[in-house]
């Protein structure tokens, strides 16, 4: 097979969301379409992906380095010699030629987004949903992937008006939709108001183990410790990103002072960065790790990160891919990880899953379409379809 | 004053250089021109900078986020209220609004390049070379900036043919040009060949204290330790980047095993990353720190990095800005740091200094043109001039 052309576009998400540190009013995402010369079921095989959400698009490095390097590669360089299908590992090696050490975030999103699109192609070529391909390549040997995965719903962003009432409406809606576990933003209001938010959600979900908090890196050391001590009695599922992602000393202090579980990882962009987080964070295995595949070089890097985390005593159950979307759902199921995240209705067309996925009793069923299956997520697929159409496909 | 328009361009450097890990054949640089409504000496005040060299350009984030944010800002938001001149600190704060924590490298080069161009404007508005402005704002109180700074010359890249003979020619040329201290690449050849290179240069410079090695992150832990032990008898000035920039455990092991000085910093993109390098690297002050201002958010971040390094016991003498060009020369002189780096004739028009700078007995004199003084670096200024001309200036 041969890659004929690749298109990318930066799409504004136009979100009114706000966490403890920033608003998302300028946020964008990068979408890619990798067009091949192959057909399956009468349709041309095109690989799609986007660079997760919550950060900005990565069109510069896509256009200037990584798309040109993929397009310059020959099929003999890119394809698996046995199957003749593009091999994401070979593509990754090619994309990373002539890259200096370090500065992962400068390229990891562009590379990861393209790598995900190549996995979409692999799934489509083989007629398998991506999670099945991943289970075969990266799963626990001998373990069949489950037919559904545990799935929590993210949200609870701050609203300027009627915050508490609307938070309650939001969580009730999630429970009605089949979710049992929720995550809300934290750290953006005075402590008393934060505790009111927590208690109002606890009254709805019924147990601290069903509520996680995301502090979005808002705290310095003393604030993080004070906040962790204040929420300790609730026995929450986790406290996510209490401080700057590189502030391992505060992670260590919170881990030592807080009986609950700390979480982090969406702002780590390579296995090297994850290694330092685990080495210096003082978790001793008691951490929820949240890598985001398209932000951090893709699924092969996720596989390295999972192996590294396991070696640091982190259970698979406590590896929870970040980014509430189909890509992380496949990663969770395929690699046998703890839980998927869902963002239904948030981050424009990018949040949430496809119409193949049902939420039932806190679990998400898995899509059966070949590849990632964005074709069954109509508002998002419209963007991908237009992108491929711009290449005359 | 008001910023009227900003242009940026990605310029190929078309370098045939090769270090231990990569070649630089695809390398680019980003150049910016910040056009104001002000005139000095009959010329419009335009701020210029580029994002150093050795990594790739950063046109994506420049175009998509940081130039638009600067252009949307009002003079009241951007300017120092006393002088009416643009204030780089206010500009920095504005550029970093709506930026998530972490992922510094994704934006630090775009932000740093614009910040440097704003300092060029400040110098031009005040009729002072940038190093004098920096000495006033960031230097040691009461200390006048020197009229020249210590300056070493970087080079010694690997050549496919006649490597040793051409290395000798290169170093003899540097000595003839007035340099006394040189840095050559290391780690790209078998150890015996590396030692031959080192000894051939030592025979020319006369003392180990006048030769530094740059291993360009080539080694894993065991190789780094073996290499450090092998070069220890030469008493070299420093061993730069023996391993991956995030591999603090190898930095620590080398620091403990090696009696000489380890160097690093060009692949650290924020004060948070420098803090971890110093905290976990095990240097106990015995390190040469090499931050690169336009790669790492600019000169205000450099000031924070210098304060942080001083607090970790690193002498100013051992802070040596990376990037052999006018921007780092001003930083070295203005902040009273240890040494500037020079790359005459390498990295196309971007390496080396302006014609105002003379190299004498291992020191570089300082330019007297207002601002950074790229106007006196003709091959480079041609690029800036064309860029400003594209805006009709």
Image (tube, coloured by chain):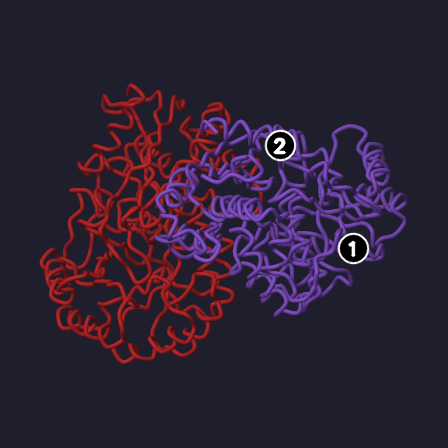
Chain colours: A purple, B red
Question: Residue A86's x, y, as percent?
Answer: 47, 50
Question: Residue A301's x, y, as percent?
Answer: 53, 57
Q: Distance between the Cα atoms at labels 2 and 1? A: 31 Å
Q: Which quadrant does the N terminus of chain A fall into? A: top left
Q: Is residue B315 above or below residue A57?
A: below
- Asked where in the image residue B255 lies, by quadrant, the reply is bottom left
> Residue A59 has which mark?
none
Question: Residue B147's x, y, as percent?
Answer: 22, 49
Residue in the image at 61% along x and 55% along y: A134
Residue in the image at 90% along x and 45% along y: A203
Which subunit holds the residue at mark 2? A
Q: Farthest front residue?
A: A42
* A32 and B23: which is toward the camera: A32
Taking the image as drawn, is residue B268 in sight?
no
Residues at marks 2 and 1, common chain?
Answer: yes
Sequence-wise first label, 2 or 1: 1
Which subunit holds the residue at mark 1? A
Task: Identify residue for label 2.
Answer: A380
What secondary structure is marked by label 2? Answer: helix
Residue in the image at 23% along x and 21% along y: B42
How packed mark 1 is, by other alpha carbons closer than 10 Å (few <14, some 14-19, many 20 or more), is many
Q: Is residue A325 above or below residue A166?
A: below
Taking the image as drawn, is residue B162 in sight?
yes
- In the image, is B284 to the left or to the right of A152? left
């Amino acid at each position: 097979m041969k890659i004929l052309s690749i298109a990318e576009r930066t799409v504004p998400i136009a979100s009114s969301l706000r966490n403890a540190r920033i608003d998302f009013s300028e946020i964008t995402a990068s979408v890619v379409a990798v067009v091949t010369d192959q057909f399956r079921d009468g349709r041309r095989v095109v690989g799609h992906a986007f660079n997760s959400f919550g950060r900005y698009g990565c069109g510069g490095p896509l256009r200037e380095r990584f798309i040109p390097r993929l397009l310059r590669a020959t099929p003999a360089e890119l394809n698996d010699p046995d199957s003749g299908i593009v091999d994401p590992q070979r593509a990754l090696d090619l994309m990373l030629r002539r890259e200096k050490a370090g500065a992962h975030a400068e390229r990891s999103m562009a590379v990861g987004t393209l790598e995900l699109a190549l996995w979409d192609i692999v799934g489509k070529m083989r007629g398998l949903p991506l999670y099945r391909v991943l289970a075969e390549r990266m799963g626990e040997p001998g373990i069949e992937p489950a037919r559904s995965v545990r799935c929590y719903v993210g949200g609870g962003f701050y609203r300027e008006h009627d915050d508490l009432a609307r938070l309650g409406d939001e969580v009730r809606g999630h429970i009605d939709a089949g979710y049992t576990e929720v995550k809300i933003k934290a750290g953006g209001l005075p402590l008393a108001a934060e505790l009111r938010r927590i208690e109002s959600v606890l009254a709805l979900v019924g147990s601290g183990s069903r509520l996680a908090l995301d502090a979005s890196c808002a705290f310095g050391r003393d604030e993080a410790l004070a906040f962790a001590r204040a929420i300790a009695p609730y026995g929450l599922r986790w406290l996510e990103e209490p401080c700057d992602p590189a502030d391992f000393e505060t992670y260590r202090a919170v881990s030592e002072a807080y009986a609950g579980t700390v979480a982090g990882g969406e702002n780590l962009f390579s296995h090297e960065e994850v290694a330092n987080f685990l080495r210096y964070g003082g978790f001793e295995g008691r951490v929820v790790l949240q890598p985001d595949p398209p932000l951090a070089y893709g699924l092969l890097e996720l596989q390295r990160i999972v192996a590294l985390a396991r070696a640091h005593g982190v259970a698979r159950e406590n590896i929870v891919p970040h980014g509430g979307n189909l890509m992380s759902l496949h990663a969770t199921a395929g690699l046998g990880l703890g839980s998927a995240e869902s963002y239904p209705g948030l981050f424009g067309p990018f949040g949430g899953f496809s119409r193949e996925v049902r939420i039932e009793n806190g679990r998400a069923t898995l899509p059966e379409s070949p590849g990632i299956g964005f074709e069954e997520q109509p508002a998002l697929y419209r963007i991908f379809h237009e992108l491929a159409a711009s290449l005359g496909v």
